Structure formats: C-alpha cells, structure tokens
Image (cartoon, rainbow, N blue to C red):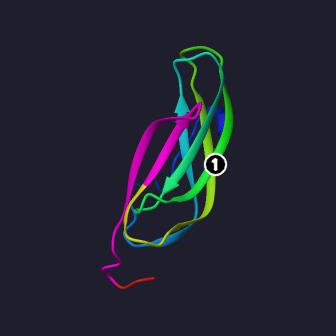
Amino acid sequence: MPNGKVAFVGVFTNFTRPVVVPQFTIATCWTDGVGEFTQSLRILNPQLEQVIEVKHQKFTLKNRVTPATHMTHLGGVDMSKAGVYWIEVYLEDERVMSIPVPVQENILGRR
C-alpha cells in the first residue's frame, strides 16, 4: 500500500462460471473502536458447507476515526459448483457480515 492508499483492480461481485479461483483478496476495513481486535473469515458453498476458513487475524484501532484495513490473500478457492457462495466476516467470533457471491452455470461451455 503505497502511502497508505489501497488500489483495487479487478473488483468482482460474481463469477460467470464455476471455477477454482487461483487467487483473490478479501479487503476489510474497520473503524469506530479503540483497541486490539480479531477478525475471522469463512467462505461457504451453495450447500452452506465451509470451503475455507481464516481465523484470528488481529488488528488494532488506535482511535474511532482512523481505519484499520486488512487484506486477506486467498488461493485455490473451490467455487466449482454453481449457486450462491457466502463470504462471512466475524469480529471477535461474532458474525457481522455475510456477502453473497453468485456463481453462474457455465452457459457458454468454456473452462
């Protein structure tokens, strides 16, 4: 992050075909607190089975207005079934957000 600035390239909200995702990053940004905190992430497949879990990522909020940005780099995430996947974000082991990521059927027959 040059000069503390984050630049995003290739932002997506869905996949146009089932795939094992070679790599991607989940960015979270936290504010409105002071102290040491822990986030965790889970990705669930359309059957709500856990695909991946990243636990106990620690971050610090120095004051209520200065954000803490956390980048979680993932690779080889299996999204090979069509349907809605869920990225769940936890703060101190409490789910605070669920983000849907639809994966469409491979209607064009591409791999």
Among all residues in the image, which is located at the extreme left?
107
Q: Is residue 107 magenta?
A: yes
How far across and down, in percent of the image, does residue 11 sit?
45, 53
Q: Position of residue 62 (x, y in %)?
A: 65, 17
- Residue pushed farthest bottom? 109
Start and end of the magenta stretch? 86-108
In depth, the one of 71 and 2 nearer the eye is: 71
For residue 107, above or below residue 94: below
The vertical placement of 34 against 29, above or below, is: above
The residue beneath circle 1 is 54
Q: Position of residue 59 (x, y in %)?
A: 67, 30
- Name the residue rendered at 40%, 62% in the picture: 46
Q: Looking at this view, is 83 or 109 the one in front?
A: 83
In this rendering, would 68 be left or right of 104?
Answer: right
Three-letter code, disc 1 = Val
Residue visible at 62% across and 56% down? 74
Where residue 24 sits, quadrant-wise, is bottom right
